[in-house]
Amino acid sequence: MAVKDDYQDFKNALNDLKMNNKSSINFLTLLAEDKIHNAQQIVRAIEERILEVGAFFCFIFIYFRLCK
């Protein structure tokens, strides 16, 4: 499978993770292990997701702090 496909598969699975769900986290772990040959792309997908979610939660925090 191509590097881009591995990246996109993992990114899509990671974007489906909405809650602290053990089965979803186990699936992501297995997927990452299966695509270990493209570890840099897996890490990139995780970093991007952290930045996306982090920015969202920072916005919510700032919004509620300003509204108090």
Image (spheres, grey):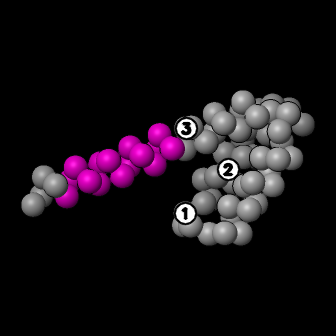
Q: Which residue is mark 2?
A: 12
Look at mark 1 in the image and give the residue it sits on. Answer: 18
Relative to residue 61, is residue 54 drawn left or right?
Answer: right
CA–CA distance in space, label 2 to label 3: 12 Å
Q: Which residues are magenta?
A: 50-64
From the viewer's perspective, tell me whether residue 43 is left or right of residue 48: right
Q: Position of residue 46 (x, y in %)?
A: 61, 42
Disc 1: CA contacts within 10 A as few (<14), some (14-19) or many (>=20): few
Instruction: Give the amino acid at mark 2.
Output: Asn
**Where residue 54 sits in the image (x, y, percent)?**
42, 46
Please report contact status of discs 2 and 3: CB closer than 8 Å, yes or no. Answer: no
Q: Is residue 2 above or below residue 10?
A: above
Q: Which amino acid does the dot numbered 1 rest on?
A: Lys
CA separation in Å, label 1 and label 2: 12 Å
Lower position in the chain sequence, tag 1 or tag 2:
2
Badge 1 vs badge 2, beta-carbon distance below 8 Å: no
